[in-house]
Amino acid sequence: MLQTPFQLLNLLLEIDEQLSTWRYRHMNMVHRMIGTRTGTGGSTGKDYLKGALDKHYIFKEIAGLTSFLIERQQLPKLSLTLEEKLGFKPS
């Protein structure tokens, strides 16, 4: 029941990771091509891209969910039918 949302969240985090990898490779390419000169639009070139790499994550809050825990006594009770469907109780 919870596998689909889990997979969706993992895919979103994978997108974020791939974008971060692209930004890193782009930053390195810019450094090789223009060195420390001024970048496109008057930006600081590699330094600007490095700042963007460190700052821009699309799904930052989702990545933080991995450490989100609910105390066991705070968990809502599941119905007996749902417990059986999830395999928590023998039918």
Image (spheres, rainbow, N blue to C red):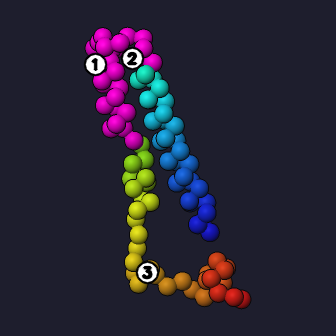
Q: Amino acid at mark 1?
A: Thr
Q: Position of residue 55 (x, y in %)?
A: 33, 38
Q: Position of residue 10 (x, y in %)?
A: 54, 52
Mark 1 touching mark 3, by CB under 8 A? Answer: no
The magenta segment is: 29-57
Viewer-side label of 1, 2 = 2
Taking the image as shown, residue 63 lies to the left or right of residue 50, namely: right
What secondary structure characterizes most of the magenta part?
helix
Q: CA distance from mark 2 to mark 3?
A: 51 Å
Q: Position of residue 43 (x, y in %)?
A: 29, 18
Q: CA distance from mark 1 to mark 3?
A: 50 Å
User: Residue 33 magenta-drawn?
Assistant: yes
Q: CA distance from mark 1 to mark 2?
A: 11 Å
Q: Closest to the observer: 60 or 79?
A: 60
Residue under label 2, please give it: 31
Q: Quadrant of residue 36?
A: top left
The earlier-in-sequence mark between 1 and 3 is 1
Q: Amino acid at mark 3?
A: Arg
